[in-house]
Amino acid sequence: MEYSCVSLLIFCMSLLCFLISTQGRWHHHHHHTKHKHHSHHDTMPEISAPPEPSIALAPEPSGPPDDENSGGSTEVFDVRKFGAIGDGVTDDTNAFKMAWDTACQVNSSSTIYVPNGFSFMIQSTIFTGPCQGGLVFQDFDDGVHVVKIDGTLMPPDGPEEWPKNNSKRQWLVFYRVNQMSLQGGGAIDGRGKKWWDLPCKPHKGINGTTLPGPCDSPVAIRFFMSSNLTVQGLKVKDSPQFHFRFDGCQNVHVESLHITAPALSPNTDGIHIANTNGVQIYNSVISNGDDCVSIGSGCYDVDIRNLTCGPGHGISIGSLGNHNSKACVHNVTVRDSVIKVSDNGVRIKTWQGGSGAVSGIMFGNIHMISVRNPIIIDQFYCLTKDCLNQTSAVSVSDILYEGIKGTYDTRSPPMHFGCSDSVPCTNITLSDIELLPAQGDIVLDPFCWNAYGELETLTIPPVYCLREGVPRSILDNKDMDHC
């Protein structure tokens, strides 16, 4: 009986194992057949494809980008894709020109991408517009976010390395472009030292003289006959001459620039504008060997805010009227700024013999730190000692100085109003002025010559030399050549 029970148990277990094995083989065969059936219709596994990126990859330099861009997308063109090496020695000019020409033909917005960690040497070049869509010349890490980079743009090193057939008056020029943004956290190194040391430069000749001879030096970045421009976030240093120049431009927005050059580097203005209107210069730091910002003839609707300037020559309107020319500047505001250790603070400078007018100027809430000539109007501007006296002059009127405080270098008076004998300055207004000597206790008296205006508040130091009213010469001269 016991043997029969054991036999029955063994038989049941064997039957159960057989059934499980058969079911497993059937299930494996069924699953394998289903998988083969799926593969017959589609070469890809059953996984949903990721969405297309909103920014297209840079094209190879052998061909233009795909014209079938989705609406609102931005084409990105990496200069390395066009052959740029970025070792600081190889000439990368052609790669940049190819990238520009390709990006300029895109109907939608496009970005020229100058990657970090590289130094690109570029010859004197003109980037010409107009372009089909908006263009961003970018030297930051991607097409959306601005980041600090180590990459650098640089010209040939000095006049001896400059190609003889290239202009020595300019380096990078953007001509007839519209809706362009030059931005990023990158660096532009003008390599200006060898240019500054030319014997034709002031005090660079034998025994500190200035020798005659060819003296052209390139402006680092020039915009010419362009509109709707943004320049933002760049670090620019050591330009051979002006760092930025805007000629014949409209609607210019400059934001968060950092411009540096040695205090004795000649003619290295930070930003120069001429025949340009609708200008905003905000939140920037400039120290150099000349004017932080210089405003030439033909400029109007200029707003400068939160600028830290110096060492340098301050913020200037002019010089105007050179070679008996007509000059017009109006509606300029400079406010909420700091000027430190500079030869001048806020300055208006005109040559004798010119014509035209400077009017509607406001300097407000400016802090001076050890500045010579914190407030100066000079209608006898001259670079030599042998300028001839002339009767005609660019008129200066409607100038407001408000909330200008700080310290001045006692080598010059804190306020200087040197106005033309025949065309006096008129309607000068002083309000809330407090200027004290940076060293010592000697308070110098302001200087006035043929200057008319009023005090809205008491000033430190006191100003007694402004004349009241409007001079008869202005009232009688109805044909004065105003703008």
Image: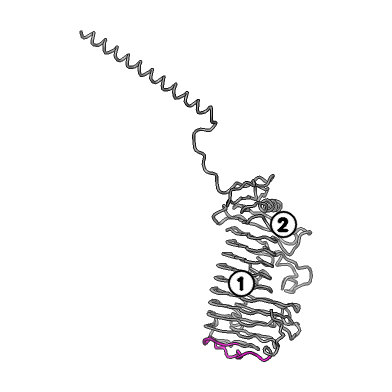
The image quarter containing residue 388 is: bottom right
245, 195: nearer the viewer: 245
Whole-percent x and y of residue 140? Answer: 58, 55
Callout 1 secondary element: strand
Tell whether position 454 is magenta: yes
Kind of residue at disc 1: Val
User: Which residue is identified by label 2?
Assistant: 123
Whole-percent x and y of residue 242? Answer: 67, 67
User: Which residue is identified by label 1?
Assistant: 302
Is residue 63 toward the left or the right of residue 1 in the image?
right
Kind of residue at disc 2: Gln
Q: Could you tell me which residue is drawn at 67 percent across and 88 percent down?
A: 474
Is residue 376 toward the left or the right of residue 25 in the image?
right
Is residue 459 toward the left or the right of residue 385 in the image?
left
Q: Nearer the viewer, mark 1 or mark 2?
A: 1
Whole-percent x and y of residue 18? Answer: 35, 15
Examine the rendered structure and indicate whether residue 461 appears above or below residue 147.
Answer: below
Main secondary-structure element of the magenta-colored stretch? loop
Callout 2 secondary element: loop
